[in-house]
Amino acid sequence: MAKKTFKISRILIPLDLSENSMLALEHGTFMAKLFKAELFLVHIMETRVLRLDLGSITTAEKKSATEAVQTKLDELASQVYLKHGIKTRTIIKAGKISKSIVDAATENKIDIIVMGTHGVSGFEEFFIGSNAFRVVTESTCPVLTVQTHTSKMGFEKILLPIDSSDESREKVPYAMRLAKAYNARIHILGILSVDDDDAAALLDKKLEQVEKYMEKHEIDYTSELVEGDNLATTTLKYAKKSKADLICIMTEQEENFTGIFIGPYAQQVVNHSKIPVISIRPEVE
């Protein structure tokens, strides 16, 4: 189980003012109310030189754009405070989107990032990746990603996939903390990827430990063991079957030829899930 205590007192929400990011603001605000947390709204002014016939952006244009963004962020922060009484700060950073978001989280000692994602597939998924997934893999704090399909606020059914890896159980205290705050039921899903009696026995033992943990903390739960060759596909299918509204996963750390850390399981789940996903990085000894 995780050694760190999962607390939520500071929530970072990256905003590009798209529909997805505004939905993330709603989810983050809902979470802030439950945990009595503070919100940090961040907008990244991506640094890139415009080519074609437009030339480079002038200093005056950059200043004007920054002022317009600041005005909008201040307006949103004011609305959140007046409606919900939640203290809300605003941040504007310039740079690469994913790195700047992670830097903002580190600089402000953020406990969780809540951000929108459009999901990606094909070449972009396996070779480039979305900004949301880059944040998931680079952030040291948990990241909650939401797509436009997830307009319902709050969680009632949290899917907790458990596999044979040593890190898999680290997310259990996180799921428990969320279940308590949202008054949700946890669906423990043991996923057996190989037809092996020893592996099945080991997974059974891990599931039993997770069940005892839930009982100790008085969490309503169900538990099931399934077989599946593709862990991500099995997880997503079960999420649909059980009508889960949140999936709790770990991010693997596998370095590919691009130099970016990408975990295939986490990548597929984050990019293809129609419901929110909270991704938690394994602890380093």
Image (cartoon, helix red, strand yellow):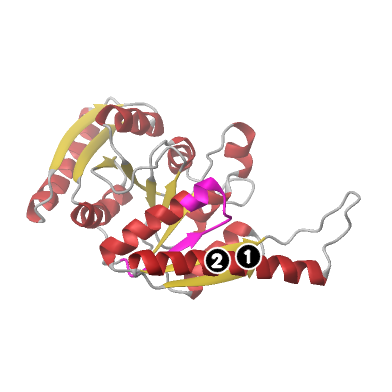
- Return the mark for residue 73: 2
Give the residue displayed 43% in from the left and 38% down from the top: 269
Q: In the depicted view, which residue is nearer to us: 282 or 153?
A: 153
* Residue 163 percent across, percent down from the top left: 29, 40
**Label 1 – label 2 distance at C-alpha:** 6 Å
Left or right: where 223 falls relative to 134: left
Mark 2 is surrounded, within 10 Å at the Cα level, by few (under 14), some (14 to 19) or many (20 or more) other residues, namely many
Give the quadrant of the N terminus.
Answer: bottom left
Left or right: where 135 falls relative to 7: right
> Is 216 rendered above or below residue 94?
above
Left or right: where 231 falls relative to 23: left
Residue labelled with disc 1: 69
Residue 190 location, quadrant: top left
> Is 135 rendered above or below residue 126?
below
* Residue 29 percent across, percent down from the top left: 37, 59
Residue 83 location, quadrant: bottom left
* Residue 9 percent across, percent down from the top left: 33, 70
> Is 68 rendered above or below residue 276?
below
Q: Amino acid at mark 2?
A: Leu
The local secondary structure at tag 2 comes to: helix
Mark 1 is surrounded, within 10 Å at the Cα level, by few (under 14), some (14 to 19) or many (20 or more) other residues, namely some
- Return the mark for residue 51: none
Task: Work out whether residue 193 can be spotted.
Answer: no
Give the residue displayed 37% in from the left and 50% down from the top: 278
Q: Which residues are magenta?
A: 8-22
